[in-house]
Image: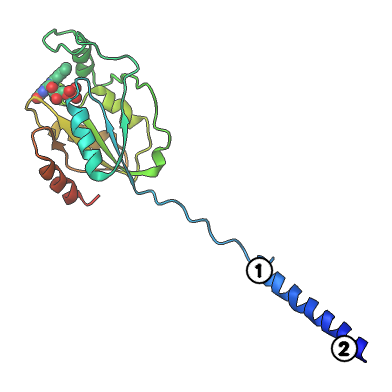
Amino acid sequence: MKKFLSVALVALTMMICTACGSSAEKPADKTEPAQVEAPANKILVAYFSCTGNTKKAALEVADILKADTFEIVPAQAYTSEDLNYNVEDCRANIEQKDNNARPEIKSKLANPAQYKTIVIAFPIWWGAEPRIIDTFVENYDLAGKTIVPVCTSGGSEIMTAEKNLQALCKGATVTSGKRLGITSRDEVKTWLDSLGL
Ligand SMILES: Cc1cc2nc3c(=O)[nH]c(=O)nc-3n(C[C@H](O)[C@H](O)[C@H](O)COP(=O)(O)O)c2cc1C
Protein backbone atom coordinates (compact mmCIF):
# COMPACT_ATOMS: atom_id res chain seq x y z
CA MET A 1 0.00 0.00 0.00
CA LYS A 2 2.83 2.31 0.98
CA LYS A 3 4.58 1.46 -2.31
CA PHE A 4 1.37 2.11 -4.27
CA LEU A 5 0.94 5.51 -2.61
CA SER A 6 4.49 6.65 -3.42
CA VAL A 7 4.14 5.52 -7.07
CA ALA A 8 0.85 7.47 -7.29
CA LEU A 9 2.53 10.55 -5.76
CA VAL A 10 5.39 10.43 -8.29
CA ALA A 11 2.89 10.07 -11.14
CA LEU A 12 0.85 13.02 -9.85
CA THR A 13 3.97 15.19 -9.50
CA MET A 14 5.00 14.35 -13.10
CA MET A 15 1.52 15.24 -14.38
CA ILE A 16 1.61 18.62 -12.59
CA CYS A 17 5.10 19.36 -13.94
CA THR A 18 4.06 18.45 -17.48
CA ALA A 19 1.01 20.72 -17.19
CA CYS A 20 3.16 23.58 -15.88
CA GLY A 21 5.69 23.11 -18.70
CA SER A 22 3.11 23.22 -21.49
CA SER A 23 1.51 26.42 -20.18
CA ALA A 24 4.83 28.28 -20.68
CA GLU A 25 5.02 27.20 -24.29
CA LYS A 26 3.27 28.88 -27.20
CA PRO A 27 -0.07 27.04 -27.67
CA ALA A 28 0.12 25.31 -31.04
CA ASP A 29 -3.24 26.58 -32.22
CA LYS A 30 -2.65 30.26 -31.35
CA THR A 31 -1.30 32.53 -34.08
CA GLU A 32 1.61 34.92 -33.57
CA PRO A 33 0.61 38.45 -32.54
CA ALA A 34 0.66 40.81 -35.54
CA GLN A 35 4.06 42.39 -36.20
CA VAL A 36 4.04 45.99 -35.00
CA GLU A 37 5.35 48.12 -37.86
CA ALA A 38 7.74 50.96 -37.08
CA PRO A 39 5.73 54.20 -37.27
CA ALA A 40 6.55 55.99 -40.52
CA ASN A 41 6.62 59.39 -38.88
CA LYS A 42 10.27 60.30 -39.09
CA ILE A 43 11.36 63.64 -40.51
CA LEU A 44 14.17 64.14 -42.99
CA VAL A 45 15.85 67.41 -43.90
CA ALA A 46 17.34 67.10 -47.39
CA TYR A 47 19.46 70.02 -48.50
CA PHE A 48 21.41 71.28 -51.47
CA SER A 49 23.96 73.98 -50.85
CA CYS A 50 26.88 75.22 -52.94
CA THR A 51 28.29 78.01 -50.79
CA GLY A 52 27.09 76.99 -47.32
CA ASN A 53 24.14 79.33 -46.64
CA THR A 54 21.45 76.72 -47.15
CA LYS A 55 23.42 74.04 -45.33
CA LYS A 56 23.60 76.23 -42.22
CA ALA A 57 19.85 76.97 -42.32
CA ALA A 58 18.99 73.32 -43.05
CA LEU A 59 21.05 72.02 -40.14
CA GLU A 60 19.29 74.45 -37.82
CA VAL A 61 15.91 73.15 -39.00
CA ALA A 62 17.11 69.55 -38.52
CA ASP A 63 18.27 70.40 -35.02
CA ILE A 64 14.92 71.97 -34.10
CA LEU A 65 12.96 69.04 -35.54
CA LYS A 66 15.39 66.35 -34.32
CA ALA A 67 15.36 65.17 -37.92
CA ASP A 68 17.72 63.07 -40.01
CA THR A 69 19.69 64.91 -42.68
CA PHE A 70 20.64 64.11 -46.26
CA GLU A 71 22.89 66.26 -48.40
CA ILE A 72 21.90 66.38 -52.06
CA VAL A 73 25.37 66.12 -53.57
CA PRO A 74 25.62 66.64 -57.34
CA ALA A 75 27.33 63.84 -59.27
CA GLN A 76 29.29 66.64 -60.92
CA ALA A 77 30.20 69.33 -58.38
CA TYR A 78 29.41 72.96 -59.25
CA THR A 79 32.55 75.05 -59.67
CA SER A 80 32.55 78.81 -59.04
CA GLU A 81 32.48 79.29 -62.83
CA ASP A 82 29.39 77.06 -62.99
CA LEU A 83 27.70 79.36 -60.46
CA ASN A 84 28.74 82.68 -61.98
CA TYR A 85 25.28 83.87 -63.02
CA ASN A 86 26.77 87.03 -64.55
CA VAL A 87 28.05 84.81 -67.36
CA GLU A 88 25.02 84.06 -69.46
CA ASP A 89 25.95 80.52 -70.41
CA CYS A 90 27.36 79.35 -67.08
CA ARG A 91 26.20 75.85 -66.11
CA ALA A 92 23.68 77.03 -63.48
CA ASN A 93 22.10 79.50 -65.91
CA ILE A 94 21.84 76.92 -68.69
CA GLU A 95 20.17 74.46 -66.30
CA GLN A 96 17.71 77.03 -64.95
CA LYS A 97 16.64 78.03 -68.45
CA ASP A 98 15.81 74.40 -69.26
CA ASN A 99 12.70 73.09 -67.47
CA ASN A 100 13.73 69.55 -68.31
CA ALA A 101 17.31 69.73 -67.02
CA ARG A 102 17.81 67.11 -64.29
CA PRO A 103 21.40 67.24 -62.96
CA GLU A 104 22.37 63.87 -61.53
CA ILE A 105 22.67 63.31 -57.78
CA LYS A 106 25.59 61.30 -56.40
CA SER A 107 23.64 58.97 -54.10
CA LYS A 108 20.12 57.97 -53.20
CA LEU A 109 18.33 57.84 -49.86
CA ALA A 110 18.73 54.41 -48.28
CA ASN A 111 15.20 54.10 -46.91
CA PRO A 112 12.85 56.87 -48.06
CA ALA A 113 9.75 54.96 -46.87
CA GLN A 114 10.59 55.67 -43.22
CA TYR A 115 10.03 59.41 -43.67
CA LYS A 116 6.55 60.87 -43.49
CA THR A 117 7.85 64.42 -43.79
CA ILE A 118 10.71 65.73 -45.89
CA VAL A 119 11.96 69.28 -45.51
CA ILE A 120 13.72 70.26 -48.75
CA ALA A 121 16.21 73.11 -48.44
CA PHE A 122 17.80 74.86 -51.42
CA PRO A 123 19.15 78.21 -52.62
CA ILE A 124 16.99 80.23 -55.00
CA TRP A 125 18.45 80.26 -58.50
CA TRP A 126 16.85 82.64 -60.97
CA GLY A 127 13.76 82.96 -58.83
CA ALA A 128 13.16 79.22 -58.42
CA GLU A 129 14.55 75.95 -57.07
CA PRO A 130 17.74 74.63 -58.70
CA ARG A 131 16.96 71.88 -61.21
CA ILE A 132 18.79 69.34 -59.05
CA ILE A 133 15.91 69.71 -56.56
CA ASP A 134 13.58 68.58 -59.35
CA THR A 135 15.85 65.55 -59.84
CA PHE A 136 15.62 64.82 -56.12
CA VAL A 137 11.84 64.93 -55.86
CA GLU A 138 11.39 62.89 -59.04
CA ASN A 139 13.73 60.18 -57.73
CA TYR A 140 11.22 59.01 -55.10
CA ASP A 141 7.60 58.08 -54.67
CA LEU A 142 6.46 60.95 -52.45
CA ALA A 143 2.75 60.07 -52.43
CA GLY A 144 1.27 60.52 -48.96
CA LYS A 145 4.27 62.44 -47.65
CA THR A 146 4.43 66.02 -46.46
CA ILE A 147 7.00 68.16 -48.24
CA VAL A 148 8.20 71.37 -46.61
CA PRO A 149 10.17 73.70 -48.91
CA VAL A 150 12.68 76.11 -47.40
CA CYS A 151 15.24 78.30 -49.14
CA THR A 152 17.95 80.86 -48.77
CA SER A 153 18.44 83.65 -51.30
CA GLY A 154 19.77 87.13 -51.88
CA GLY A 155 16.25 88.49 -51.53
CA SER A 156 13.90 86.47 -53.73
CA GLU A 157 11.01 84.71 -52.09
CA ILE A 158 10.11 81.03 -52.26
CA MET A 159 6.67 81.20 -53.92
CA THR A 160 7.71 80.12 -57.43
CA ALA A 161 9.67 77.15 -56.08
CA GLU A 162 6.73 76.24 -53.86
CA LYS A 163 4.40 76.21 -56.88
CA ASN A 164 6.87 74.17 -58.95
CA LEU A 165 7.26 71.60 -56.16
CA GLN A 166 3.48 71.31 -55.80
CA ALA A 167 3.37 70.23 -59.44
CA LEU A 168 6.36 67.88 -59.21
CA CYS A 169 5.65 66.10 -55.91
CA LYS A 170 2.82 63.87 -57.12
CA GLY A 171 0.41 62.79 -54.38
CA ALA A 172 2.31 64.68 -51.67
CA THR A 173 1.14 67.60 -49.56
CA VAL A 174 3.46 70.54 -50.14
CA THR A 175 3.17 73.02 -47.28
CA SER A 176 3.81 76.72 -47.57
CA GLY A 177 7.54 77.36 -47.64
CA LYS A 178 9.84 79.78 -45.92
CA ARG A 179 12.90 81.80 -46.77
CA LEU A 180 15.49 81.17 -44.06
CA GLY A 181 18.79 82.75 -43.14
CA ILE A 182 17.12 86.04 -42.27
CA THR A 183 15.08 84.73 -39.35
CA SER A 184 16.02 83.96 -35.75
CA ARG A 185 16.00 80.39 -34.47
CA ASP A 186 12.91 81.21 -32.39
CA GLU A 187 11.05 82.45 -35.46
CA VAL A 188 12.02 79.33 -37.41
CA LYS A 189 10.83 77.16 -34.53
CA THR A 190 7.52 79.03 -34.26
CA TRP A 191 6.94 78.58 -37.99
CA LEU A 192 7.83 74.86 -37.89
CA ASP A 193 5.52 74.39 -34.89
CA SER A 194 2.70 76.06 -36.83
CA LEU A 195 2.99 73.35 -39.51
CA GLY A 196 2.13 70.68 -36.94
CA LEU A 197 4.53 68.15 -38.45
C1 LIG B 1 23.04 80.70 -60.31
C2 LIG B 1 22.52 81.50 -59.16
C3 LIG B 1 21.34 82.18 -59.29
C4 LIG B 1 20.83 82.92 -58.23
N1 LIG B 1 19.62 83.54 -58.37
C5 LIG B 1 19.10 84.24 -57.34
C6 LIG B 1 17.83 84.86 -57.46
O1 LIG B 1 17.14 84.76 -58.47
N2 LIG B 1 17.37 85.56 -56.39
C7 LIG B 1 18.08 85.68 -55.23
O2 LIG B 1 17.60 86.32 -54.32
N3 LIG B 1 19.28 85.08 -55.09
C8 LIG B 1 19.81 84.35 -56.10
N4 LIG B 1 21.03 83.74 -55.96
C9 LIG B 1 21.72 83.83 -54.67
C10 LIG B 1 21.53 82.57 -53.81
O3 LIG B 1 20.17 82.19 -53.75
C11 LIG B 1 22.03 82.76 -52.38
O4 LIG B 1 23.33 83.24 -52.38
C12 LIG B 1 21.94 81.50 -51.58
O5 LIG B 1 21.91 81.80 -50.20
C13 LIG B 1 23.10 80.53 -51.85
O6 LIG B 1 22.91 79.37 -51.08
P1 LIG B 1 24.10 78.32 -50.80
O7 LIG B 1 25.21 79.06 -50.08
O8 LIG B 1 23.49 77.30 -49.95
O9 LIG B 1 24.55 77.79 -52.11
C14 LIG B 1 21.55 83.00 -57.01
C15 LIG B 1 22.77 82.33 -56.91
C16 LIG B 1 23.24 81.57 -57.96
C17 LIG B 1 24.55 80.84 -57.82
For the residue marked with disc 1, what is the amino acid? Answer: Ala
Residue sticking out furthest to the bottom = 1
Quarter where residue 50 is shown: top left
Which quarter of the figure is the N terminus placed in? bottom right
Q: Residue 107, relative to residue 19: is it above or below?
A: above
Q: CA distance from mark 1 to mark 2?
A: 29 Å
Residue at x-position 20% and y-position 43%: 175
Q: Is mark 2 within 8 Å of ligand 1?
A: no
Secondary structure beneath dot 2 equals helix
Label 2: few (<14), some or many (≥20) within 10 Å? few
Q: Is residue 160 visible?
A: yes
Q: Position of residue 19 (x, y in %)?
A: 73, 75
Rendered-image quarter of ligand 1: top left
Q: Which residue is mark 1?
A: 24
Residue at x-position 76% and y-position 73%: 18
Question: Which color mode does the image show?
Answer: rainbow
Residue sticking out furthest to the left = 155
Question: Is residue 100 toward the left or the right of residue 162 in the image?
Answer: right
Q: 132 or 56, which lies in front?
A: 56
Q: Position of residue 92 (x, y in %)?
A: 21, 15
Residue at x-position 20% and y-position 27%: 129
Q: Nearer the viewer, mark 1 or mark 2?
A: 2
Q: Residue 31, relative to residue 91: is it above or below?
A: below
For the residue marked with disc 2, what is the amino acid? Answer: Leu
Q: Which residue is mark 2?
A: 5
Q: 128 or 181, which lies in front?
A: 181
Contact (Cβ within 8 Å) of mark 1 with mark 2? no
Mark closer to the chain start, 1 or 2: 2
Q: Position of residue 114 (x, y in %)?
A: 40, 43
